[in-house]
Image (cartoon, helix red, strand yellow):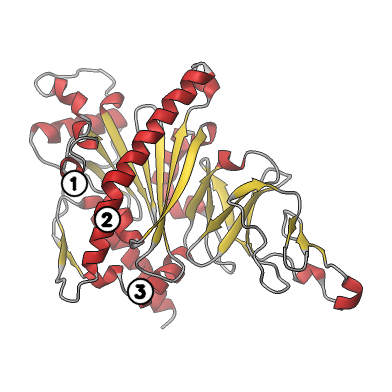
Amino acid sequence: MTTSLPRQDRIRRALELLRNETTDKFEEIIAFEPDEFTDPVLAKEERDYIFGRVPSIVAHSSELAKAHDFMTVQMPRNNLIVVRQKDGSVRSFVNLCRHRGAMLEEREKGRCRIFSCGYHRWSYDPDGKLRTITRDSTFGDIDRSEHGLIEIPTEERHGFIWVVDNAKAQIDVADWLGPEIDGILSEYRLEDSVCFRAAGFDEPTNWKIMQDAFLDGYHIQYAHPNTAGKIIHTNVMAFEDFGRHCRFIAPRKSIDRFLEEDPGDANLDKYVTETHFLLPNSTLLRQPDHFQLLTFRPHPSDPTKSRMEQRLIVPTIEDSGMPPEKWDRLWNKNWEILLAVLHNEDFPLLRHSQVGMGSADAGDMLLGRNEIANQVFRRETKKLVAQGRADNA
C-alpha cells in the first residue's frame, strides 16, 4: 500500500502497478447487505450521526464571492441559507422564519441585504438578527435577540465552505481532516481557483450508491467504454489510507509510452488522475489542469433518494494566461463532456442499481480487495453510525 510518498514517487508506483497488471489491495473481501441502501431507520441514523456530527462541503468559496452573496442548500437535516458576511466570513442559518415557519428564501442563489418572509414580512439581517416584526404594536413584546435565525456551524477552509448540519454541534475542519489531508488540501491552494460551474441533480438513488460509484476504479472500461475508458486505465490504483479519508492515483493511458522505458526524472503529472475521498460524502478529482468536486447528500426522509452536486474548479482567467473567450470555451466544453457522461452513463446505471437493491431476496453483496476506496467509505461511515448509537444507548 502506498503511503506518505512524494507525488512523483506515487505516480511511478502507479506505473509499476500498471506494468505488473495489478493494483493496491486490501486483505479481505467485505460482504454487505442491500438493505443498507433502503432501510429508513439506518438512513435517519446516517443523517443524524454522520451529517449531524461531522463537516461536509456545501460550496466553493468563489460561489459566494462578495458580501451578501447567498445560496440555499438542502442538507440531510436542515434547509440552509449560506451567506457571505460584511466582514468576509461565511455563516449559515436554517432557512425558516422564526414566526410561523415559512421558508425565507426560495432562490438557489443571489445577493440579499435583508431576508424577508413572504408570509407576514418579518425580516432578518444577513447575520441572522431579527430586523423587523410587522405591525409590532399589535403582535406583542418578544426578545428579538432570542428569535433570530438558527445558526448552523460553518467554516471556510482550503477554498471550500463546510458545515455541520446540526445547530448544537461545533465545527473544526482541520481536526476532522487530520494533518495529512489538511496539509494536502493546503498545498493545492484551491482558494485561488474559481468554480467555473456548479449543478445539482436529485436522483432516485441512495447517497452511498452514488458516492461508491465515484470512488471506483474497477468499473471504468465496462461502464464508460467510449468515454473515460479510453482515457484512464481500469483497476490500477496507487492508494493511500489516511483513516477517515483516502486518495489514489490512477494512470491515464497516455502513460503507456513509459511501460517499456524509464521515465527518468520526467514530471509525470499530466499522465494521471488523482482521486481524494473526503469523508463523509465528497470526491475531489485532481486532473492535470483543474479539479472536480462531487458531493452526495441523503434525502431528508427517503433512503432511496439523494442529491449529487458537481463543481468544476479551475484556474482564474488571469492565472491561466488565456484570453477570456478561450478560457470560457475550454471549460464550457469540459463541463458539457462531464454532464454527458453523468446523464448518459452513470445515472441510468445507478438508478437501476437502486431498483435492484429493493428486491426482497437480493442476497449478500461484496466489495473486492481491489475496491479499496469503497471499503474505506463503508468502514468509516459504519464507525460514525456505531459511535452515534453508542452515545445514545
| Residue drawn at x 35%, y 38% as measured from the top left | 338
Circle 3 sits on which residue? 42
Q: Are marks 1 and 3 in contact (CB under 8 Å)?
A: no
| Residue drawn at x 51%, y 16% as measured from the top left | 323
The residue lying furthest to the bottom in this view is 393
Circle 2 sits on which residue? 350
N-terminal of the pair, mark 1 or mark 3, is 3
How many numbered callouts?
Answer: 3
| Residue drawn at x 40%, y 39% as measured from the top left | 292
- Closer mark to the observer between disc 3 and disc 2: 2
Circle 1 sits on which residue? 219
In percent of width and height, residue 30 lies at: 17, 63
Which residue is more in the foreground, 87 or 253? 253
Q: Are marks 2 and 1 in contact (CB under 8 Å)?
A: no
Element assignment for label 1: loop
- Closer mark to the observer between disc 1 and disc 3: 1
Screen quadrant of the C terminus: bottom left
Where, by quadrant of the figure, is residue 265 drawn?
top left
Report the amino acid beneath label 2.
Leu
Query: Is the residue 256 above or below the residue 210 in the image?
Result: above
Report the amino acid beneath label 3.
Leu
